[in-house]
Image (spheres, rainbow, N blue to C red):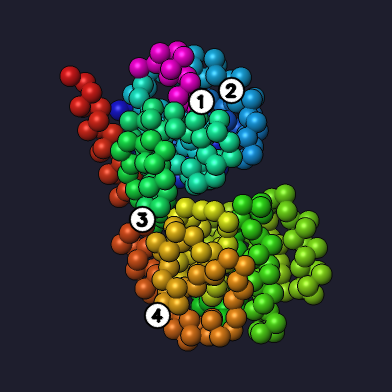
Amino acid sequence: MKLVLIGDGDSPHLLKWALALAPRVSLYAVSSRGFLPGFDAAVPAARRLALNTAPRFAGGNAALLRCLPRVAAWLDAVQPDWLHAHYLSSHGSLAWLARRLWRLPARIVGSAWGSDILVTPERSLAMRWLTRRVLRACALTTSDSQHMAQRMRALGAGEVMCFPFGLEALPERTTQALPYRFFANRGLEPIYAPQRVLAAFGAMARAWPVAELVVAHQGSLLPALQAQAAAAGLARRVRFVGRLDAQAQAREYAQARWYLSLPASDSVSVSVLEAMAHGCIPILSDLPANRELVRDGDNGLILADAALPSADMLAPLADRAEAIARANRAWVAEHALFGPAVERFVARLAELQGQRRP
């Protein structure tokens, strides 16, 4: 079965899909940007097409659409069975238009990433129309939360497979977590509300004088966040460490007792799953997908809009920290490992391909 990934090859998330699919299909890849070095282990350079554009979350990605003839010609030469688009409003549109305008025989499977379903269709009637067209063009779609799957069906999706964008393996716990260490590693962009993460930590820092926060990742809000930390007198207790590789990030998870993720919109986040697998206690915003993972006050904390955590909220969780860590790791092991989910996904593609062949 010949499958072409279409997405952002600079994203570790697309690389994770590539590594999982490579042993199971004949894999090719089109990237709107370039490719991370890790793609060499999954997709030979001769099977890759890098468009080297700079897609933006906010839209207006005309440069990507101008690559459409080049993409269609490349796909026509490959003759794949499946076009597997990741992030539907941009790469899904590219796959849909290439197939429709150039009459390619390949079918489309689409994997939603979160904001492409939960945010983009609400921005304008045009984006809602486009999202509907892409979803209806997909023979199969995937979602990482039941909440997002429901939204996809409401927008016109047919068959939706739902499974978390989980872990390749459960990490070992080799380091004792520091009781007052907080960790956050979502993008430093407005959708992830990192200002609220700092405010939440500030509330705990006043109650716990030895508390500290490590903020990973990059984004346009970094200067404002550094200024916010300094203004709150937290400059020495908040470390901004930038984008981390997998090993460095694993060390930060392992050392943190608490994990902060407070986006305004989200599906099931792989970062939250990673934190739970490492034994962190998650502190999350009140979103439907987050409630699929956390029972408020039991295995983590759900913060209502604009609410801040308090020592009274966290103390009962801290008293049960090890039991929570074991329970969260066990849930991830049972429900959120990526390999078995991809195996089911590929098997379903093979079934659909077989149904079509006669």
Q: Read off the residue under disc 2.
A: 65
- First in residue order: circle 2 vs circle 4: 2
Left or right: 247, with 17 as reference point: right
Q: Read off the residue under disc 4.
A: 323
Spatial CA distance of label 3 from label 2 is 35 Å
Q: Read off the residue under disc 1.
A: 94
Spatial CA distance of label 4 from label 3 is 21 Å
Amino acid under label 3?
Answer: Leu
Amino acid under label 1?
Answer: Leu
Spatial CA distance of label 1 from label 3 is 29 Å
Q: Alpha-carbon neighbours of circle 3 within 10 Å: few (<14), some, or many (≥20)?
A: many
The numbered disc on residue 82 is none
Q: Is residue 11 above or below residue 281?
A: above
Segment tinted magenta in the rendering: 93-105
Q: Position of residue 31 (x, y in %)?
A: 54, 31
Tell me, yes or no, whether the highlighted magenta stretch contains residue 333. Answer: no
- Judge depth for marks 4 and 1 and give the one in front: 1
The numbered disc on residue 337 is 3
The reply to whether callout 1 and callout 2 are in contact (CB within 8 Å) is yes
Quadrant housing residue 320: bottom left
- Residue at (58, 36) in percent of width and height: 124
Closer to the camera, 269 or 13? 269
- First in residue order: circle 4 vs circle 1: 1
Q: Main secondary structure of the magenta part?
A: helix
